[in-house]
Amino acid sequence: MPSFDVVSQVDVQEVRNAVDQANRELANRFDFKGTDSVVSLKDNAIELESASEERLKAVTQVLEEKLVKRKVSLKALDYGKVEEASHGRARQKASIQVGINDEKAREIGKFVKTLGLKGVQHQVQGDQLRITGKKRDDLQTAIGKLREHDFGVPLDFTNFRD
């Protein structure tokens, strides 16, 4: 029986490269001189720090540009609130979401059911979703519809078996 997996993954190496590029640009740009703006990757989170909230927004924009160039979906980032750091500086943490949580998996499953494709079923397997069907064409239709719909998380389709 044909099947495929719906997963939400982020290439950590691409995120690391984007963070390095953002730091290089912050060091070289004139409008960031003297602000000591820093972007750092720690575990599954990116920490942004700058002299003020306005500079922090600019740092966020630079980081997002670098992530988009490296084809990392911005849906994978979950920004926390802006905190005040020492010496009047501003700090923000952006956690990287990996995997599909139960709530999103249920939402995707309901969406697949509402498509009305005959013989297509879903099954939650940890942080991913397996979708099976009788016909390959129905599964390809399901992939197309899932790509069109916005679930708030980046979706990848892997392990397509015939």
Image: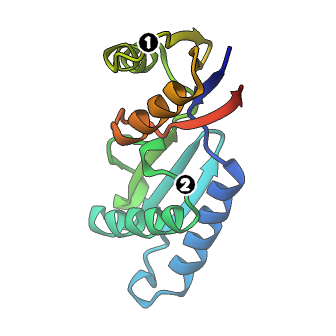
Which numbered marker is on residue 87?
Answer: none
Percent x, y for residue 83?
35, 46
At x 41%, y 17%, the residue is: 117
At x 56%, y 10%, the residue is: 124
Q: Please rate how many residues cluster around mark 2, counting C-alpha atoms within 10 Å: few if below 14, some from 14 to 19, many from 20.
A: many
- Front in this rendered view, residue 44 or 156: 156
Percent x, y for residue 161?
72, 26
At x 45%, y 32%, the residue is: 141
Residue 83 position (above or below residue 127): below
Q: Residue furthest bottom?
A: 30
Q: Residue under label 1, please give it.
A: 118
Percent x, y for residue 101?
49, 19
Residue 41 falls left or right of residue 25: right
Secondary structure beneath disc 2?
A: loop
- Front in this rendered view, residue 137 or 82: 137
Q: CA distance from mark 1 to mark 2?
A: 34 Å
Amino acid found under the numbered disc labelled 2: Val
Q: Which comes before the other along the chain, label 1 or label 2?
A: 2
- Front in this rendered view, residue 119 or 102: 119
Q: Residue under label 2, please give it.
A: 72
- Front in this rendered view, residue 110 or 12: 110
Residue 93 position (above or below residue 137): below
At x 59%, y 27%, the residue is: 136
Residue 134 falls left or right of residue 118: right
Pointer 1 and pointer 2: residues touching (CB < 8 Å)? no
The N terminus lies in which quarter of the figure? top right
Q: Residue furthest left?
A: 54
Amino acid found under the numbered disc labelled 1: Lys
The C terminus lies in which quarter of the figure? top right
Secondary structure beneath disc 1?
A: loop
